[in-house]
Amino acid sequence: MNKIEKIELEKSINSLEARNNELKGLILASNSLDDAEKMDNEFKENLIKITEAQNKLDNAEKGEIKMPKYLEAKNSVEDLIKILQTSDNKNVAANKWNEKLVENGLEIKDDSLILPKRIVSAIETSLTDTNPVFKTFKLTHVGALLISQGLDSSDEANVHVEGTEKKAQSAVLTVDAIDPQMIYKIQTISEKAKRLNSNFDEIYETIVAELTQAIVNKAVDLALVEGDGKNGFVSIANEKDAKKVKKITAEKYVDGIEDACDFVRATAGIKYLIITSEQRKAILAEVRALNPNARVKNNDAEIASEIGVDELIVYTGSKALKPTVLVNQTYHIDMGSLTKVDAFEWKTNENALLLESLSAGKIEKNKSAAVITISTI
């Protein structure tokens, strides 16, 4: 179990525990025996899920394979880079690397041990920590076509009067699919670093700081703004399904955000407001104008509380982002693991290192997000 899987399991446990705490209060306050029984059943089912998830987490930690010393050592990074430099393609690199592992007495049964620990840890940290928007997405590494479906019916439920015929209602099953595409980053390596085999720190920094960060940033831009359905992503801004994403026009930010929050209210999860730094300044000014006698502090948590979202995220990219309200884990990104040897390739002719990931992304749930246009701008 890798770091990302552990984080997701811990999130699931926390979510179930929070729901059970909520159910306790609802059961005590309920005046309906049927409702109380339903909530009690849900409470018991959640307890089972919590126990199973906690056992899985505990067992993973107890039975976790200790990282072999070779993969912890700096020379494993050096060996990997040498193999990349001298291999014609990814398959050759993977075979040579496996041979190197066998030389060092390692039998690989866990894919998370494929790369040296130093690189794996740095990449996983980059995926979870370096872009504030990326944490809001549901991330998987299945490498499959993303498909979502929904049942659409405009008819309401009817009341059957005894002696009359029940009328059939129409419904349409919609299926959306999106083909994954390759996100890649090629970074040139200095000739000095290539010649001097002892200078691996620059190449290591390139892998972590340049390549991984660039791919994470690109995935965020595709998910928020750039995804057009042809590049592996349908962005929140370009989502045409009005049941999933609402397009809102308002004269003021606070009014648009309020409408956006109303739209996503029914969807469980943390509500994020993703904005640029300039939009944040404008929102703060509006909030302060509405509360002249109680000056709102220039603090993300306080601003979020005033405008009705759970958390404020300042987008650090360069795309033309409109203020976006997004419910946590409703935008799904599937991308090939960046912690595998076959994600890397040394471009000998270009003196460059390539990192690429087959990726796709789209909104999965109804009432997941809203994009706000300010009409006075």
Image: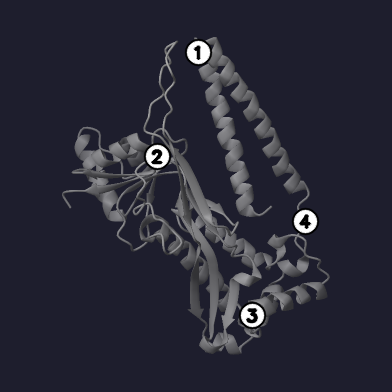
- From the image, tell me which residue sits under label 3: 84
Residue 329 in sight here: no
- From the image, tell me which residue sits under label 4: 65
- Label 1 neighbourhood size at 10 Å, few (<14), some (14-19), many (20+)? few
- The answer to whether marks 1 and 4 mark residues whose Cβ atoms lie closer than 8 Å is no
Q: CA distance from mark 2 to mark 3?
A: 45 Å
1 vs 4, front mark: 1
Q: Which mark is residue 30?
A: 1
3 vs 4, front mark: 3
Q: Position of residue 93 (x, y in %)?
A: 68, 78
Mark 3 or mark 1: name the one nearer the start of the chain: 1
- Label 3 neighbourhood size at 10 Å, few (<14), some (14-19), many (20+)? many
- From the image, tell me which residue sits under label 2: 367
In the image: residue 236, left or right of residue 41: left
Helix, strand or loop at disc 2?
loop
Residue at the extreme left of the image, as rendered? 376
Q: Position of residue 175 (x, y in %)?
A: 47, 48
